[in-house]
Image (cartoon, rainbow, N blue to C red):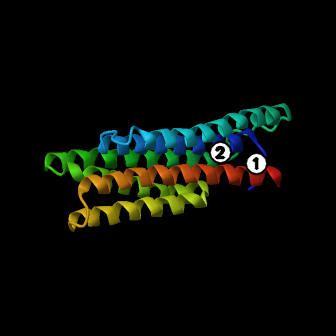
Amino acid sequence: MKISTVNDIEGIRGELFHMILFSMAWAMMGEYIIDFTDFAMGVILTLICVVFLALYSIRLYDLEGELEELGRISFYSDQGEKRRDRSYALILLFEGIAVLVSWSILLKYGHDNWVIPAFALIAGLHFIPLARLIRQTSYYYLGVWISLLAVVCYWLFMSGRIDDRLANTVIAYGCAAGSVLDGIAIIFRARRQLQS
């Protein structure tokens, strides 16, 4: 795919924003789990990476302006794009409902230590249909990574090999790292498309 319209740029910026929010949220969960005993180093490292992603996103505004000057503005070119946007919103809606329901059930039955693995599994699984929908191959890898991380860490603490606090910390930071790396992959892909 070649970047040729303002919509293309907005799509890339939207995906970067998604990775920025996702990585910051998971890093904060990781810090909360370990009671900031690392002096928030995980959040600081994530913040440095997020700033890099945000600065690139800002650079895309300049490119968007250039494309607007060339008259390369494209709104919905067909019903397929509208349908894709609607499907995207539905995936995020179902993810939110799954998180709310799982959180409520787990807390009601006294399994608060299962909340992080459940959230991570839901988050990982939501990337798989998104990957297909928006043709973002790296989302398949991110979804599989997060889902496997959630399942393996859950299994490790349920089998007594590690405690739940360590498992939840590994899950949170693993999710943050995966999303930062995916954001970097999005940038490299955008640069390659801009050069073609």
Residue at the (52%, 38%) spot, across then down = 47
- Give residue 22's position: percent from left, percent from top: 47, 44
Residue where numbered disc 2 is placed: 12
- Helix, strand or loop status at disc 1: loop
Residue at the (39%, 40%) spot, across then down = 28
- Residue 53 is marked as none
- Can you tell which quarter of the image residue 7 is in? top right
Who is closer to the viewer here, 14 or 43? Answer: 43
Q: Amino acid at mark 2?
A: Ile
Q: From the viewer's perspective, is 94 left or right of 101? A: right
Image marks 2 and 1: residues in contact by CB distance under 8 Å: yes
Whether residue 80 is visible = no
Instruction: Name the quadrant of the N terminus.
Output: bottom right
Q: Residues within 10 Å of mark 1 (few under 14, many from 20)?
A: some
- Can you tell which quarter of the image residue 174 is in? bottom left
Q: Amino acid at mark 1?
A: Ile
- Can you tell which quarter of the image residue 32 is in? top left
Nearer the N terminus, badge 2 or badge 1? 1
- Give residue 33's position: percent from left, percent from top: 30, 44
Q: Residues within 10 Å of mark 2 (few under 14, many from 20)?
A: some
- Give residue 106's position: percent from left, percent from top: 20, 50
Residue at the (76%, 53%) spot, across then down = 193
Residue where numbered disc 1 is placed: 3
Mark 2–mark 1 Cα distance, whole angstroms, equals 9 Å
- Helix, strand or loop status at disc 2: helix
Whether residue 8 is visible = yes
Is residue 140 positioned above or below 106 on the image?
below
Residue at the (76%, 42%) spot, across then down = 5
- Give residue 92's position: percent from left, percent from top: 44, 46
- Residue that lies at the very extreme toward the left in this rendered image: 109
